[in-house]
Amino acid sequence: MSGLVTLARWEMIILLGGLAAIVFFKLLTGGIKLSGLLSGDRQDGSSGFSPGRAQLLVFTVLVALNYLIEVIHNPSPTSLPGMSPTIVGALGGSQALYLGGKAWSLLRRNQG
Amino acid sequence: MNSKVNGMYLSAVVVAVIGAIIVASPWVPGDPAAKLKLAVGYALLILVFMFGLAILIAIVQDKINISGLLEEMDGGASMSRFQLLIFTFVIALSLFLVVVAKNDFPIIPPEILTLLGISASTYAVSKGIQMSSQSPALGLTLTPTTLGPLAGGAALPATAFSVTLVNAPAGTPTPALTWSLDAPAHGTLTPQPPNAAVYTPDAAAPAGTKVTIRVQAAGFLDGTAVVTY
């Protein structure tokens, strides 16, 4: 049975790791387009740098990295590490800010 | 390409079956019931691995195109898709690391489910905002939309059809219109610029005949009206 478990472990390492590596490689080499990631719509209909998107990117990367580090140092034998409600709330606020900015720019554009 | 893909799947099944036969073979010691469980387990693992590998290879070779994974309809990358991608990978990878370390499925804390929920909801709401920002399609409508039933056999009066622009901002000039009949034998259509045409019915058209008048313009959805005899 241990052989089966070892095989399953290596299989998932290859498949999940492979998928992550391919997506990451394509992100780096332009195979998956990232142009315009930080650009938002302005009131006049043109596009430019969006602070709302930038703050969401920073929050996302920080929270994701923080959680990965916590998992690597996971002290619990039975569960994934939890996350502070403050961090979840902050991330929710960040996402709400991004969505609010997007909705506001749409509203202003429609009024203008 | 299909034959190559089928060959790959076929070879995956063959390898899985061979693996199962080897595990279940009489020269491998052990209880037959346990060996059967192991054989099925190995066969499924091999099958899943080969199918997964085939998908990864297809992605690498661009037979499965993921270049638009983060793309919005306007061509730019989407921040909401990007954050959903990052959180999905991080949670999946974390779950895998914990399962590998403990050999058991861990309890998932509610904060993590909330995090994934927030992330996915942001994507959904962003999509909704984007869809609502799309301008409605421009179109043409004809007035009247129907005519008839017309009684054949006698001289029938000509009828004018006029065009109205739909979803166009006030003051939009009438575009160049192209008028047509789907049954040119039944009547004639005389354009009256800028926005009308006169239809002269066919007095000899049999009862039950239907003729569709169509008006077209570049960038607008067609307008139609139906004449019934």
Image (cartoon, grey):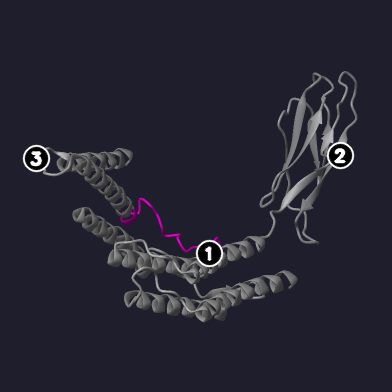
Of residues A109 and A72, the one drawn nearer to the viewer in this rendering? A72
Q: Is residue B24 left or right of residue B222?
A: left
Q: Specify the amino acid type for callout 1.
A: Ala
Looking at the image, tell me whether mark 1 or mark 3 is earlier in sequence order.
3
* Residue B120 - label: 1
Secondary structure category for the residue under label 3: loop
* Precedes in sequence: disc 2 or disc 1: 1
- x%, y% of residue B25? 14, 38
Q: Which residue is the site of mark 3?
A: B27
Residue B75, position in %: x, y?
52, 63
| Residue A14 is one of the magenta-drawn residues | no
Asked which quadrant contains residue B190, the reply is top right
Residue at image location 76% in from the left, 36% down from the top: B213
Which segment did they paint magenta? Answer: B59-77
Residue B206 shows up from this direction: yes
Q: Residue at x 45, y 60 (%)?
A: B69
Amino acid identity at mark 2: Ala
Give the camera-side residue of B116 and B112. Answer: B112
Q: Main secondary structure of the magenta part?
A: loop
